[in-house]
Each structure stands twice: as structure tokens, then as C-alpha cells.
Amino acid sequence: MASEVERLQAALAGALAGLAGRDQTPQSCRGPLSVGLDVLEVGEVALSLAAQPERYARRVYTDAELCECRSSCGTLDPFALAQRFAAKEATLKAFRVLDECIPWHSISVRCDNLGKPSLELTGAAAALADLRGFGELEVSLIRVGGLAASVVVARSQTC
């Protein structure tokens, strides 16, 4: 039986292949790619939620993210929040953030009605994406065992 790490590696490989397969940009217009990856234990988010649920949630996540991550009985899903946290970190890694101060709320992960995730950038994150020339962003959210992960691919626009 595959270990949690092996299952995560397979999921990440599949996510990268899926992100690459969605690229419909003509070859002549493709700029360089930047990839960010983040993995964390869901237990870390669960501990933060247990210690200070509202303070932690409001500091890191947008209202829209919190709405998407609530169950029908109103409790926050630590797995869904951990995936979004990983996506925020992966975005910062893809953007090659150095000393820039990027607030958590300026990166929001939204899922459409089919569950496909996308990134919404505002404020400092949107400005940094523009400065770095990233016109296209793709995100994949992954959960394996007690781990949540995200891969973000940012492509510079050359056309």
C-alpha cells in the first residue's frame, strides 16, 4: 500500500500534468512559467481553529473563502481551509516574493459550481502579478490523508 507521501507525490504529479494540459495558449505566445508548491498538515489549521477560530479565520481568509469552507451546520472545514492556505503560500512562491508584503486577503481561492479552483488577486497580490508579468494563473488543490497541498503555475504573457 502506498504511503501518504507517495500518494501525495502522485497527486502532485497529476496536478502538474493537468495544469499543463489546460494550456490553450498558442506556442508563439507562451512566456516562461513559474511554479509554486506548498504542503501542510491539516492538523496545523485545525489547531489554529481550535485556539482562536474567528481571529484566525478572519486574519487569513476572505469572506468568500470562509463561506465556501463552511459545512451545512456552519462549522469551518479544516481540510478546505488548509488547501486554501497552501494555495496562498504556493502563489507567493510562484511569484518569487522576496521582501514584498502581500496580505493573505489579497489572494483568494474560489471554486466554481463543479469544484474547479481559481485564484482571485486583489491589491498587493494583483499589483505584484502585474509587475512580474503574470497574465495567467492556474491552481490545483490536493488532499491526501492528513495533508493538504497546492500547486500554482503562473505564466508570463509575451503576446
Image: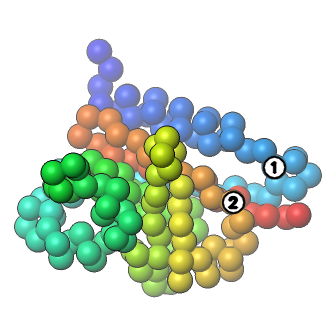
Say the numbered circle drawn on residue 136: 2
Q: Residue at x 87, y 47 (%)?
A: 27
Taking the image as shown, residue 88 lies to the left or right of residue 76, namely: right
Say the numbered circle drawn on residue 6: none
Q: Residue at x 39, y 47 (%)?
A: 149
Q: Residue at x 58, y 68 (%)?
A: 95
**Residue 107: image location, x then y, percent:** 47, 70
Circle 1/circle 2 CB separation < 8 Å? yes
Q: Which residue in the structure is indicated by mark 1?
A: 25
The C terminus lies in quadrant: bottom right
Q: Nearer the viewer, residue 98 or 50?
A: 50
Residue 36 drawn above or below residue 101: above
**Residue 72: image location, x then y, percent:** 21, 49
- Give the colour scheme of this rendering: rainbow
Residue 26 drawn above or below residue 107: above
Taking the image as shown, residue 35 lies to the left or right of residue 12, namely: right
**As shown in the figure, which amino acid type bears the numbered disc 2?**
Glu
Taking the image as shown, residue 27 lies to the left or right of residue 33, namely: right
The N terminus lies in quadrant: top left
Q: Evaluate whether residue 40 shows in this view.
A: no
**As shown in the figure, which amino acid type bears the numbered disc 1?**
Thr
